[in-house]
Image: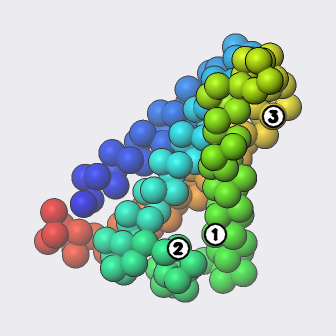
Amino acid sequence: MKREIEIKIREAYQTLFEAWEALRKHQNDEAIRKAIKCIKASMETVRKTSKYLFNNEDIIKTSDKIIEKMNGIIRLERRRIARALLIERIWLNPYLIRLVEKGTLDLKPKNILKEEEARIAVDHASEVYYWADSVVFKLIKSNKIQLNNRS
């Protein structure tokens, strides 16, 4: 499981990098697609970690355990969790994904999506990725002995 988590967080990082590159090249639709992929991979990583360590992948139900292991400021960590879940709901909306993949009203995604949407998507992906990475790092670090025994 540890290996799967490491692969998934690396995938999230790679797609975030690709999203930034697409944004730099003004490929707004591609930047949004990559940002969505990064958000999805980041959240899957946190869920896998939560399931592995706490036997439950529901982030809300395990949030107190996550916060305790993070040794962070409770209010700040709750805000980060809530923001990650909100961002996930916004960008993993099936209608939005369909629009980004196929377009609508006979318009291609590149003719619909502006740089502002792409920048917001990539910023949101960055926020979720860095939160997920810190959660995974701290949870794995705090449970290093158990992870080594389970791998």
Q: Nearer the viewer, residue 8 or 96?
A: 96
Residue 125 can be seen in this image: no
**Mark 1 element type:** helix
* Residue mark closest to the camera, 1 vs 2: 2
x, y percent for residue 39: 58, 47
Q: Are marks 3 and 2 in contact (CB under 8 Å)?
A: no
- Residue 116 appears in which quarter of the rendering? top right
Structural crowding at the residue carrying mark 2, measured as other residues with C-alpha within 10 Å and reported as few (<14), some (14–19) or many (≥20)? some
Relative to 128, say whether 109 is above or below.
above
Q: Which mark is residue 81?
A: 1
Q: Amino acid at mark 3?
A: Glu
Whether pointer 1 and pointer 2 mark residues with C-beta atoms closer than 8 Å, the reply is yes
Q: Residue at x 64, y 55 (%)?
A: 88
Q: Is residue 106 above or below residue 137?
A: above
Where does the image place residue 105, in percent across and percent down from the top left? 80, 24
Amino acid type of the residue tagged 2 in the rendering:
Ile
- Name the N-terminal-most of marks 1 and 3: 1
| Amino acid type, residue under disc 1 in the picture | Ile
Quarter of image, res 143: bottom left
Q: Which residue is mark 3?
A: 117
- Please state if 102 lies on the left or on the right of 111 as rendered: left
Q: Quadrant of the C terminus?
A: bottom left
Quick one: quadrant of the N terminus?
bottom left
